[in-house]
Every structure is written in structure tokens, then in C-alpha cells.
Amino acid sequence: MIYVLKRLGALAAVLVVSSFIVFSGMYLAPGSPEQFLVQGRTVSPEVLASIRAQYGLDDPFLIRYWNWLMDVLQGDLGRSLLTQQDVSALVASRLPTTLFLAAFAAILIAVLGVGLGVLAATRSGAFEKLVVFGSNLGFAVPTFFAALVLMFVFGSNLGWFPVSGSGEGFVDRLWHLTLPAIALAFPGIAVVARITRTAVREEQGSEHVIMAIARGVPQQFVLWRHTIRNSMLPVTTVLGTNIAGLLASAFVIEYAFTLDGIGSLLVNSVQKKDFAVVQAIALIMVLAFGLINLIVDLLYAVIDPRVRLSKGAAAR
């Protein structure tokens, strides 16, 4: 429990530092929010000054950041400069699409990455070579290019899946997001499959596995009880890292498939210097990354009790 509280405290510190860095980047970027608000129209200096005063753009940088941080701590993420909507409502309307896409991709990475890696480690020959080739392909092919290929083959040519939009309802959304999820998960599947194959192979050569087989313990029991379970520590690390990065990677896929998620909203907000929206989305991404890494650390204790003991000793 103490360990979890320490990690949550560290996560809170990371959130503050990350928000400061993002706020600084937006502040130093060329261009000004009021110019985007007037949309190229010629307005008097008095109107521009009124806009800057309304949004506190004339305040010193540190004061602006401090005011924003205090509002966030009270649950107020501000209002969008572009749409005048409450940022919480704006992000909440876009978040389900991105979360659905990321969850879909995470399931594909976990199931296909680990499954293919285990099969490649236990079945040498043509299947192993095919998995290795697929892993190399996943490393080499950019996500955006993979999305275009999937759209061309399974969308435009075969017509099996739609190539744009998020769909309505669970089944329709699942159908619409199948190709985006595959494209988003493709690099992660390649990484997890390769790491899983290597970890299982190394565990197969460990002394306790060899001794168990020599004593006549059924190979399937040894495989599931010892080999796969003991090889999951490095796999869990890589799996957690890839899943944690899905929200940050989703904007490329959302742009390619014209999805109404927070990734496409982030790109548009950065271009228009919509401070409040950019800050809110950045906080969500950092928070998601930190929480997933915390969950991965807790899973270590489930997989290997030695990790639980070492963390307990460190906490004391």
C-alpha cells in the first residue's frame, strides 16, 4: 500500500512537470491565439487588446500557468478558445472513440503478440520463420503506411470494412474501428511477439525446466506452469509500454481514418494554439501512461512473488 501511494505521489509530480513543459511549449510557439480567433480578419488594436484581456493573454507566463493549475485542481479545465465550449465537455465527447480504439488495439497486442510469440518459441520451422518475418515487417512499416495499405486492400478493394467514421453503437463501432485498431496495434504486436519468443526460448533452457522434464513432468504442464509464467516479466514490461503509448500514437490513425477522437482534436488544437484543450489532452495522456505503468508494476507481484517481497522491503 505504501508503495502504491509513493507511486501515485510520483505520478502527481510528473503530471505537474509535464503540464508545465507543455504550457511552456505552447507559450513559446510562434503565432498568437487572438490571431486565430479573428480568423485573418482585419481588426483594430483595441479589439485585439480586448481579446487578450478577456483570456488573460497579457498576464506573465508564470501567473497564467499558476491560474490554470489552480483551476484544474478545482476541476475546471477552462474553455476552448476556438469553440467556446467547456474543455471537459469537448474532451469527453471525443474521448470514447480514442479509448475504444486504444482498448481494441491493446487487446490485439496482448492476444496476438503473446500468442504468436509463444507459438513461435514452441513450434520451430516455417511458422517460426513466418512470425519472425512478420515481426521484422512490423518494425519496418510506419503506422500511417500500414493504415493506408489496410484501407486500400480491405476497405476500397474488398469492401469488408469502412475506411472512415467511428460508427454508432457497440457493434457498428467495432466494425468501423477494426482496421484502425489493427494499424495501431501492428508495431506493438511485432515487438511483443519478438520479446515473448525470446523470453520463452530462454526459459525453456533454464535448469529448473530441464530438470522438470527429466523427472517426467508432462511437457504441457511445464510449459504453462513454469516456462510461460516465468517468461512473462519482460513481456509484461514491453506489453505495458506499448499499451501505454497507444493514446499518444492514436492521432496518426485518427487522422488517416478521419475519426473524431482526442488525437485529431489535439492536432487541430496545437495548430490553432488552443491552450486549454492541448493542456487537457496532454494531462490525460500522461495520466494514462502513468497509471498503466503502475498497473504493470503491480502485475509483477502477481507473476513473481519475489518482486512483491522486494517491494515490501523497499517500502519499509
Image (cartoon, grey):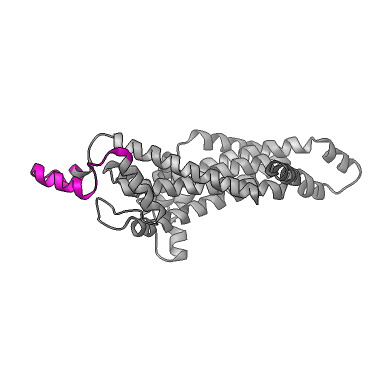
- Residue 120's spot in the image, x, y percent? 68, 41
Q: Is residue 85 left or right of residue 116?
A: left
- Residue 80's spot in the image, x, y percent? 28, 52
Toward which corner of the image does residue 240 lie, by quadrant? top right
Nearer to me, 146 or 5:
5
Which residue is found at the position 39% from the left and 57% from the top? 75
Nearer to me, 5 or 86:
5
Q: Is residue 182 magenta?
A: no
Toward which corner of the image does residue 198 lie, by quadrant? top right
Q: How many marks?
A: 0
Evaluate whether residue 195 shows in this view. Answer: yes
Q: Is residue 188 above or below residue 136?
A: below
Q: Is residue 160 left or right of residue 57?
A: right
Q: Is residue 190 left or right of residue 83?
A: right
Which residue is found at the position 68% from the left and 44% from the top? 315
Q: Is residue 51 magenta?
A: yes
Tell me which segment is drawn in magenta: 35-62
Pick the quarter of the image with the C terminus: top right
Furthest-bottom residue in view? 169
- Residue 68's spot in the image, x, y percent? 34, 48
- Residue 83's spot in the image, x, y percent? 25, 55
Evaluate whether residue 123 shows in this view. Answer: no
Which residue is found at the position 43% from the left and 66% from the top? 169
Q: Is residue 170 above or below residue 274?
A: below
Furthest-right residue in view? 215
